[in-house]
Amino acid sequence: MFVDAPAGRIRGKLQTIASSRRNGDSGADVHVRAFLGIPFAEPPVGERRFASPVPLRRLSAGDIGHYDATNLAPVRVFLARVWPQSVPRPPSEFEAILLAVCV
């Protein structure tokens, strides 16, 4: 499923969030339309680190023509303050404000 947003075309998915099926009963699943890991603003890096979010210009559609929001973004663990010499600084494309929208 797709939605056209001001920042570009976004692909989401139908997600089962609950089921009323118990002990073999025939019940109905509950579904939502899920759009996961959508960048909300430009990455808060450099001078933007402690500033208000800067609106995102365009979503990166890559070669497929839409932004794939069917999965959550990978979770990044930042241990650089604990072991700065052993943990490289993550790439800036992972430093983002992300949304998960379910309707």
Image (cartoon, rainbow, N blue to C red):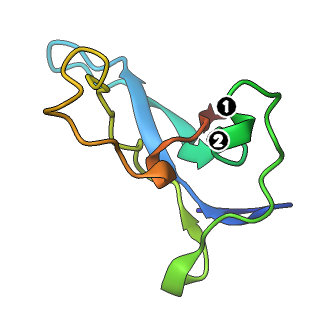
Q: Is residue 19 left or right of residue 47?
A: left
Vertical side of 62 occupied by 44: above or below: above
Q: Is residue 70 left or right of residue 46?
A: left
Vertical side of 5 occupied by 65: above or below: below
Whether residue 40 is visible, yes or no, is no
Whether residue 47 is visible, yes or no, is yes
Say whether marks 1 and 2 touch (CB < 8 Å). Answer: yes
Which residue sits at x=64%, y=41%?
46
Give me the disc on residue 49. Answer: 1
Residue 78 position by quadrant = top left
Name the one closer to the observer, 58 or 49. 49
Vertical side of 33 occupied by 59: above or below: below
Q: Quadrant of the C terminus?
A: top right
What is the total number of numbered labels drawn onto the structure image? 2
The amino acid at mark 1 is Arg
Look at the numbered disc 1 and give the secondary structure of its residue: loop
How far from the left and from the top, in percent, is residue 79?
A: 26, 22
How far from the left and from the top, in percent, is residue 16?
A: 40, 35
Which residue sits at x=79%, y=62%?
7
The amino acid at mark 2 is Gly
Point out the residue furthest to the front here.
Answer: 85
Look at the numbered disc 2 and give the secondary structure of its residue: helix
Density class for disc 2 (Cα within 10 Å; few <14, some 14-19, many ≥20) is few
Give me the disc on residue 91. Answer: none
Which residue sits at x=28%, y=20%?
21
Q: Is residue 22 left or right of residue 48?
A: left
Residue 17 position by quadrant = top left
How far from the left and from the top, in percent, is residue 65?
A: 60, 82
Q: Quadrant of the N terminus?
A: bottom right
Density class for disc 1 (Cα within 10 Å; few <14, some 14-19, many ≥20) is few
Name the one closer to the observer, 91 or 68. 91
Which residue carries the number 2 mark? 46
